[in-house]
């Protein structure tokens, strides 16, 4: 029997007027008779880092039981459907976030600056900041060779803050957790439209008038590549047609939600000078939209590394959608008041609910012989343990995903006192095929992750 099967290149994009649409992994991209060692047949491993600020109420987060029989605590309860897909990691420290002699109490600035670097940041109120290279950027330098974007950095808080936010520390330290070099923090993008255009548009500008004109023309990105889609679909097998249709529907849904958000912003604030790319009305809609964009970025292999902040440290956001009108940062200084602690637990649980939404989206998205969740490693946690005392030891952390079977999830692991958080990152980089000898204050890999 002779088989004439010509694989579609993994890097195939559909181009139209002002748009370039990457594709998900299709069966047609795998060569005939591809074996387990063929790179085209092996889905890529992705890495994600998700940050929540102001610490977490630890006795409502940490299971009492170690190993596979751990109980689902109140804050972790929304993750019950994913119990076998994550590790609860206890005992990991970020001691380089602690205050050194002569320094001010900039606990939040140091928490974010060290979270992915393990390097104590230089106290400065100017532009001469200095930290360390973060794990996401180490991964992006290598994994980014295979993708159009080396990495994505996203957040749900405004990024315009400048000046000094804590004694001796510029606000820039709290605006990001990602550092390309010791002196180059990576800016976090909070506009859904800008993220979308980075992924799917080739426009040279994000000028307000230009982008509003695009909305007013009422043309979808998918409309501009419709001819290419039709030609591609004609040559695909039924299973690939289903995958492509679901993917295109997801893109169109994200586009629709972005456009609705922009139109709502225009109606509600017609007299204000507002940049194109309005924000959804509620925090939950906003968060889910940004999380869906991350799913699309992974699905199309536009990037394999994403860093995401649910909010900046010292965030004063209130969560009225869940009945918490108090500012988050103020609540974290609860002084052991039961009412404040209960509200803070609600905020902590709400963030985990949004994480569960994201994991469900990853789990329901096919990727090669599994799903995106099967082929992704995600760290979720905070650089502060106790927000009331500003401690950086025994951080609240989750490690999510199976990394293509290279990590054994579904357990609560407790590490010896003093184990650096950066040891976890060494293990992740090794799994991703980007081994390094050290990172920040690391002392070695966390071996039990795969046992």
Image (cartoon, helix red, strand yellow):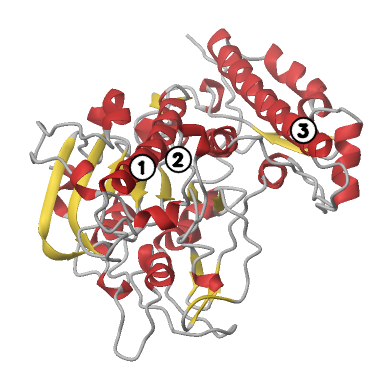
Labels 3 and 1 touching (C-beta < 8 A): no
Residue 360 location, x and y as percent? Answer: 42, 26
Is disc 3 surrounded by few (<14), some (14 to 19) or many (20+) residues within 10 Å?
Answer: some
* Residue 91 in the image: above or below residue 162: above
Q: Which residue is mark 3?
A: 264
Q: Earlier in the sequence, mark 3 or mark 2?
A: 3
Question: Taking 56 as reference, is 180 above or below it?
Answer: below
Q: CA distance from mark 3 to mark 1?
A: 30 Å
Q: Do labels 1 and 2 touch, CB within 8 Å?
A: yes
- Residue 440 tag number: none
Q: Position of residue 90 (x, y in %)?
A: 17, 51
The residue carrying mark 1 is 343
> Which percent across, then down, holds residue 393?
21, 64
Residue 17 appears left or right of 330? right
The quarter of the rendered structure image containing the C terminus is: top left
Q: Earlier in the sequence, mark 1 or mark 2?
A: 2
């Amino acid at each position: 029997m002779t088989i004439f099967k010509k694989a579609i290149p993994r890097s195939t994009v559909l181009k139209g007027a002002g748009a370039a649409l990457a594709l998900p992994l299709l069966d047609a991209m795998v060569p005939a008779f591809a074996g387990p060692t063929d790179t085209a047949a092996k889905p890529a491993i992705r890495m994600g880092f998700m940050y929540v600020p102001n610490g977490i109420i630890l006795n409502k987060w940490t299971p009492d039981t170690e190993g596979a029989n751990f109980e689902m605590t109140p804050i972790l309860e929304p993750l019950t459907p994913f119990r076998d897909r994550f590790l609860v990691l206890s005992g990991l420290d970020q001691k380089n976030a602690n205050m050194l002699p002569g320094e001010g109490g900039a606990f939040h600035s140091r928490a974010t600056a060290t979270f992915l670097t393990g390097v104590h940041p230089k106290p400065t109120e100017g532009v001469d900041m200095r930290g360390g290279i973060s794990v996401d950027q180490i991964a992006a330098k290598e994994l980014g060779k295979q993708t159009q974007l080396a990495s994505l950095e996203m957040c749900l808080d405004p990024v315009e803050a400048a000046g000094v936010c804590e004694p001796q520390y510029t606000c820039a330290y709290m605006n990001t957790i990602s550092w390309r070099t010791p002196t180059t923090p990576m800016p976090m993008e909070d506009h859904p439209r800008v993220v979308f255009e980075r992924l799917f548009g080739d426009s040279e500008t994000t000028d307000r008038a230009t982008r509003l004109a695009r909305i007013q023309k009422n043309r979808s990105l998918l409309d501009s590549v419709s001819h290419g889609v039709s030609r591609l679909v004609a040559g695909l097998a039924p299973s690939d047609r289903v995958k492509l249709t679901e993917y295109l529907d997801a893109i169109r849904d994200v586009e629709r939600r972005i456009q609705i958000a922009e139109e709502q912003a225009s109606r509600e604030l017609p007299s204000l000078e507002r940049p194109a790319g309005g924000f959804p009305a509620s925090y939950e809609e906003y968060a889910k939209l940004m999380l869906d964009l991350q799913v699309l970025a992974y699905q199309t292999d536009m990037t394999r590394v994403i860093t995401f902040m649910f909010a900046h440290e010292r965030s004063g956001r209130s969560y009225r959608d869940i009945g918490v009108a108090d500012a988050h940062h103020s609540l974290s200084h609860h002084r052991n008041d039961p009412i404040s602690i209960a509200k803070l637990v609600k905020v902590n649980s709400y963030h985990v609910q949004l994480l569960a939404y994201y994991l469900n989206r990853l789990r329901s998205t096919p990727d090669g012989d599994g799903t995106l969740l099967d082929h992704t490693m995600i760290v979720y946690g905070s650089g502060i343990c106790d927000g009331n005392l500003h401690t950086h030891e025994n951080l609240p952390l989750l490690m999510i995903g199976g990394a293509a079977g290279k990590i054994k999830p579904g357990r609560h692991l407790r590490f010896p006192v003093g184990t650096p958080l950066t040891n976890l990152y060494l293990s992740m980089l090794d799994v991703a095929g980007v081994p390094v000898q050290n990172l920040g204050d690391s002392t070695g890999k966390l071996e039990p992750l795969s046992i």
